[in-house]
Image: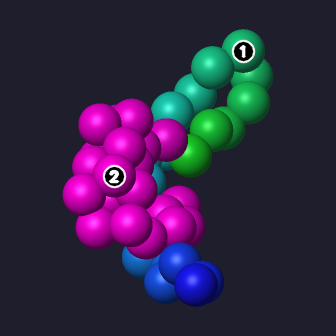
Amino acid sequence: MQQPLVAISTDVRQFDNYTWHAAPQQYLEAAIAGAGVFPLLV
């Protein structure tokens, strides 16, 4: 069975002269474990 994609909104963080897109890990873990989906960071 394929996992459906779910969009997870991210925030932008500056670190070591790079721009990173980040989301709290607990949101990602909850989406995977609780709903069985594949989170896609946007």
| Location of residue 40 by image quarter | bottom right
Residue 35 horizontal side relative to residue 6, left or right: left
| Residue drawn at (25%, 57%) of the image | 34
Image marks 2 and 1: residues in contact by CB distance under 8 Å = no
Residue 42 visible in the snapshot? no
- In the foreground, 16 or 39: 39
Q: Is residue 4 magenta?
A: no
Residue 17 spot, x, y in % from top left: 74, 22
At 56% across and 46% down in the image, what residue appears? Answer: 21
- The circle drawn on residue 16 is 1
Closer-to-camera residue (42/37): 37
Relative to residue 17, is residue 19 drawn left or right?
Answer: left
Q: Is residue 10 above or below residue 15?
A: below
Is disc 2 placed on a helix, strand or loop?
A: helix
* SS type, badge 1: loop
The circle on residue 34 is: none
Q: Residue under circle 2?
A: 33
Q: Residue at x 49, y 41 (%)?
A: 22
Q: Furthest-right residue in view?
A: 17
In the rendered structure, which disc, 2 or 1, sits on the residue that comes first in sequence?
1
Instruction: Count neighbours of disc 2 (C-alpha within 10 A) and say few if under 14, some if 14 to 19, many if 20 or more.
Output: few
The CA distance from mark 2 to mark 1 is 32 Å
Residues shaded magenta: 22-42
Give x and y (percent) for residue 2. 60, 84
Q: Which of pointers 2 and 1 indicates the residue nearer the eye?
A: 2
The type of residue carrying mark 2 is Ala
Residue 23, magenta (yes or no): yes
Here the colouring is rainbow
Indicate whether 5 appears above or below 16: below
Amino acid type, label 1: Asp
- Extreme-front residue of the structure: 1
